[in-house]
Image (cartoon, rainbow, N blue to C red):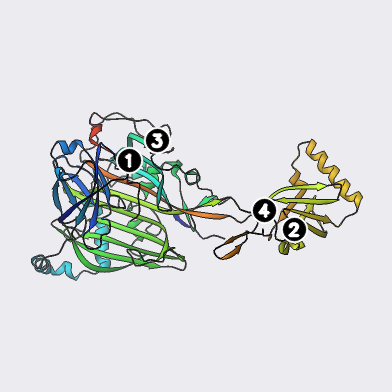
Amino acid sequence: MKNYIWFIGAYSFLLLWLCPVWSQKKDFIEGRLLDAKTKEPVVFASIRIKARALGVITNMDGSFRIPTKYKEYGEILEFSSMGYQTKEIPIDALEQDKLNLIVLDPGVIGLKEAIVEGKDKSRRRLGATQIVKRAIRAIPSNYPRRLHAVIGYYRDYQLKKEEYVNLNEAILEVVDSGFDRNDYATTKVRLYDYQSNDDFERDREGSFKYDYNNYTKYIDKAYLFNYGGNEFSILRIHDAIRNHAINSYDFVNVMDRDFISNHSFKKEDEIRLDDEMLFKICFAKVLVKFRIAGTIYISKKDFAIHKMEYSLYDKSRTTENKEKDKHGINNEIIFEVITEYNRKFDKMYLNYISFSNNFEVSQPPKFILKETVANMNCECFLLTFNNSVDPVYAMEKKFYNFKFKGKKIQIERIRIDQKTVFVYPDMDRSEFLNMTYELSAAKRKRLELLDILSIEVTGLRDMGITGDGGLESNLINDKEYVTYRQFREFFVQEIKSNGSVLKDTLFMRKDIPIFKDQTIVKPDNFDDYWMNTPLQNVKY
């Protein structure tokens, strides 16, 4: 019996390097942000076109794309990320036909800031759990309770052997009635544009629906509700801050009620975001089969939640490279949710949300039984396999289970000829002939033969092939699985604090996928928005 988890489920500009891009897009300037000390990508950093309040979020490899038209306008790019100094860089400093590698420096908390913060004794004395409690209670006052809209770049894709497959992209407008209204019931979405990106591999197996009956595609130890197959609805429900009053995902559950009791909390060093200081609170939980780790960033000013990272791990499985991640854990992730909000107009608005999960896709067995024939000449069953059979296993009677009209057929002897196994039943000639006549009659009447004669073969192995570890044989009907990682992400490019500028009612249907027969509505300023398509190389 499988146990399931249910879920609805930066910086100073030091140096500008230039190197060739893998796939030049003449309409875009492409770049990548790197941490100056670690040389690691700066993931999910905000890049804003300062004068226009538009922008993008860097990808998991630190990459980003900016339309070249903003270079022609002489615009300024503003970079910001938690733990890094916010800096402005003229777009003119970036090359159009190169991949711009930008080295970034982490931010440092100055002595003056530490002294000022030290005067706030009441907040300095608060424990980690108390801070999180206050942050949850403050959600109704810190986030918009009135109608507002955000416009941004949506994508879903999978990673297979560190390569993007099945990349789908869209520009969406999300019209939200406010945080005191039920998100799924009241929030409406317009589809400005979408594409299935054929520059990346289209992997047929990875695009199948989840199948928990035959386990052809499934999430190990978890179950993902499909919400009618609408990918964006699946993503939205994983925003535990927006859905703080309803069940979001295990083990956050209802954040208002369950988050505190389901986790333990610990304060870490505070960090700076622009001119605001944030509490950094780590949380964890260890269960029999699962491990939870995450971080939540909370404003010292008004306890607004700026960012929440949540990871659920499978304790029984370690990663292939056994390297520890940002939480110091090397178990395989079942799912991860990262949500970030930014302060604007005195309220916190969504900046981005990223939801990912691992899933398994079964591959066809390498060793199978191709055909079974009841042969009247030899008065035996001829079992034909796709590979040569290992006689050590094939001679074992216990691996064959034959039933005729529900009664077990005893086996007298077995003979082997490479890919064919001759199974001689313990019955006289008349019994065998009567059985074959009944099978022939059933076939003519188009009856289901399996209801009359059932044959089950288990335990057999083929002769195998010579590999690095010696002779490697295959067990009959043994399925192998390929692990994929599924991502659904939404990155806000513009915030409309007073709601949508479009007044029609052409919204996306929530009961069908985004990329299936949805109505497309493009506003007059549609060209202001763009798809931040990731680079082909995703190693990071």
Q: Of marks 4 and 3, which one's residue comes earlier in the chain?
A: 4
- Residue 105 against residue 200 in the figure, above or below: below
Nearer to us of marks 2 and 3 is 2
Q: Is residue 176 left or right of residue 219?
A: left
Which quadrant of the structure image shows residue 479?
Answer: bottom right
Dot label at residue 400: 2
How far apart are the alpha carbons under marks 4 and 2?
Answer: 17 Å
Q: Of marks 2 and 3, which one's residue comes earlier in the chain?
A: 2
> What's the residue at 70%, 60% (across, down)?
390
Dot label at residue 509: 3
Q: Quadrant of the C terminus?
A: bottom left
Nearer to us of marks 2 and 1 is 2
Task: Out of 6 and 200, give the one closest to the viewer.
Answer: 200
Where does residue 375 sit, x and y in percent of width and height? 83, 47
Q: Of marks 2 and 1, which one's residue comes earlier in the chain?
A: 1
- Residue 521 against residue 401 in the figure, above or below: above
Which quadrant of the structure image shows residue 169?
Answer: top left
Q: Secondary structure at mark 1?
A: loop
